[in-house]
Image: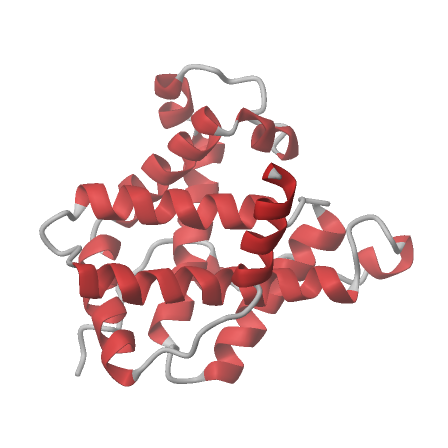
Amino acid sequence: MEKVQGEMEIERWERSEDMSDAEKKVIQETWSRVYANCEDVGVSILIRFFVNFPSAKQYFSQFKHMEDPLEMERSLQLRKHARRVMGAINTVVENLNDSEKVSSVLALVGKAHALKHKVEPVYFKILTGVMLEVIAEEYANDFTPEVQRAWTKMRSLIYTNVTAAYKEEPPGESSDSSSKVTEPSTANLTRCRPTKSNAH
């Protein structure tokens, strides 16, 4: 029974709902406050992800043996990955009105994780859920039911686009194509930087 419910949930997640212009604006406004503390929020998200779902650490040789959250917090490699994750999300948020750009950015992330890193797609659903938890707690005053609904659509958008790459090429299926995939090409995805979403 539990497996069937899980499959239904994944199926529901694979259908991304369209966001209204108002919802996109809500996400950009909330994100501008979150992104002001980019690295700290990113580190909080990853630490909670790894503490609550330790099996996810298997994909990270630099900190897979770390158990102590304080040790994780001090890890330069974890901080670097946190900045990369937050930078990718920032690029998506900044380009919510350009669906092709959003798809291409998230496809790069998906392909790198599917082919190069061999990460199981379910971890993206878990990570985006943890992201929402952390943001909702740290920015509780901003996280009204309206904001929650918009971010739930954002979470689905990220998951749907990233995992689309897995349908094209399941993890470990092709050794040839893995050599063609590079890290999401861009220095602009690898560090926290000022957001443009404040400009209206």
* Position above or below: 68 against 19: above
Q: Residue 125: x, y in percent?
A: 51, 50
Q: Residue 45: x, y in percent?
A: 37, 39
For the point 21% across and 71% down, the residue is: 26
Q: Quadrant of residue 57?
A: top right
Relative side of 10 to 198, left or right = right
Q: Residue 159: x, y in percent?
A: 53, 59
For the point 36% across and 26% down, the residue is: 73
| Pick the front one: 198 or 171 | 171
For the point 37% across and 47% down, the residue is: 131
Image quadrant where one finds the C terminus? bottom left
Find the residue positioned furthest to the front.
1
* Image coloring type: secondary structure
| Pick the front one: 129 or 118 | 129
Image quadrant where one finds the N terminus? top right
Q: Quadrant of residue 59?
A: top right
For the point 48% across and 43% down, the residue is: 81
Find the residue positioned furthest to the top.
68
| Pick the front one: 69 or 3 | 3
* Position above or below: 182 against 140: below
Find the residue positioned furthest to the left.
141
Q: Residue 191: x, y in percent?
A: 40, 53
* Position above or below: 81 against 159: above
| Pick the front one: 149 or 154 | 149
Q: Quadrant of residue 69?
A: top left
Relative side of 132 to 55, left or right = left
